[in-house]
């Protein structure tokens, strides 16, 4: 098992463009989380899935953000019409409550919106 | 609502002991976690407390008091590589949503 992977690792885009990030969790983990982190802050919860079901989405998240986990394995996070304020590190984490509640994080995707 | 408070920065000397405090207020409680995050890297799990008391794991120990909404992370025999941010996180009751504090940046000096 290679752990949680995320692609791309870096993304630079122009304001107004759409971007999509991918997360591949640890294979036996049924819960998958997306977070956003800016410099000097802790990870900010965005949304989470149990298998393919999206169980909660942050009220802070605008309608420009959408996430999917169609087959209960990998997940995608899409940001439409990006804004400069979307520049951040986007972290994915997974967990399997049957083996422990600790989250395993991927390396993150750093988004820069110009 | 949820609120987690940690000191922003701490400085300690190599070989010393440091205690990083965390206070929280949540609607329900499923457990408290400590993560370590080096600059530019993802957080890595350190400890988990769900019952009151002390959990020891090598040089790191974590304490929880649920009645006081309080936890601390104790790092012994500090090493330069311990320079990092330490994140306190709680899980809300009834969900498995994790709420993170802003983190405490620890600087270990030679």
Image (cartoon, rainbow, N blue to C red):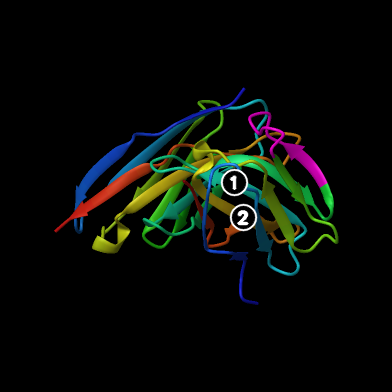
Q: Which residue is mark 1?
A: A35
Q: Residue at x 40, y 34 (%)?
A: B6
| Total residue callouts | 2
Of residue A40 and residue A86, the one placed in the foreground of this image is A86
Q: Quadrant of the N terminus of chain B?
A: top right
Magenta includes A60?
Answer: yes
Q: Which residues are magenta?
A: A54-64
Q: Which residue is mark 2?
A: A92
Question: Which quarter of the figure has residue B82?
Answer: bottom left
Residue B85 tag number:
none
Give coordinates of residue B91: x percent, y percent. Answer: 63, 39
- Asked if residue B29 lies left or right of residue B84, the reply is right
Query: Which chain does the residue under circle 1 lie in?
Result: A
Q: Earlier in the sequence, mark 1 or mark 2?
A: 1
In terms of secondary structure, where does tag 2 sit?
strand
- Chain at numbered mark 2: A
The relative height of residue A94 versus residue B96 in the rendered view (above or below) is below
Is mark 1 in CB contact (under 8 Å) with mark 2?
A: yes
Q: In the image, is residue B63 above or below residue A4?
A: above
Structural crowding at the residue carrying mark 2, measured as other residues with C-alpha within 10 Å and reported as few (<14), some (14–19) or many (≥20): many
State the residue at coordinates (22%, 53%): B108
Residue found at the very far bottom of the displayed protein: A1
Circle 1 crowding by C-alpha within 10 Å: few under 14, some 14–19, many from 20: many
């Amino acid at each position: 098992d290679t752990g949680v992977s995320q692609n791309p690792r870096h993304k630079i885009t122009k304001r107004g463009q759409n971007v999509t990030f991918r997360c591949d969790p640890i294979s036996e983990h049924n819960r998958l989380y997306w977070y956003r982190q800016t410099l000097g802050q802790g990870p900010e919860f965005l949304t989470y899935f149990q298998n393919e079901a999206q169980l909660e989405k942050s009220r802070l998240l605008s309608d420009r953000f959408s996430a999917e986990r169609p087959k209960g394995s990998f997940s995608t996070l899409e940001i439409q019409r990006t804004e400069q304020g979307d520049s951040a590190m986007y972290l994915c984490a997974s967990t399997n409550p049957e083996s422990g509640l600790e989250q395993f994080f991927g390396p993150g995707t750093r988004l820069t919106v110009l | 609502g949820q609120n987690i408070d940690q000191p922003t920065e701490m400085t300690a000397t190599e070989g010393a002991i440091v205690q990083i405090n965390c206070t929280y207020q949540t609607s329900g409680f499923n457990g408290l976690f400590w993560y370590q995050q080096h600059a530019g890297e993802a957080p890595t799990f350190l400890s988990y407390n769900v019952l009151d008391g002390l959990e020891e794991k090598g040089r790191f120990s974590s304490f929880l008091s649920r009645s006081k909404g309080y936890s601390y992370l104790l790092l012994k025999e500090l090493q330069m590589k311990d320079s990092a941010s330490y994140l306190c996180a709680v899980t809300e009751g009834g969900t498995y949503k994790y709420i993170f504090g802003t983190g405490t940046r620890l600087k270990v000096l030679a």
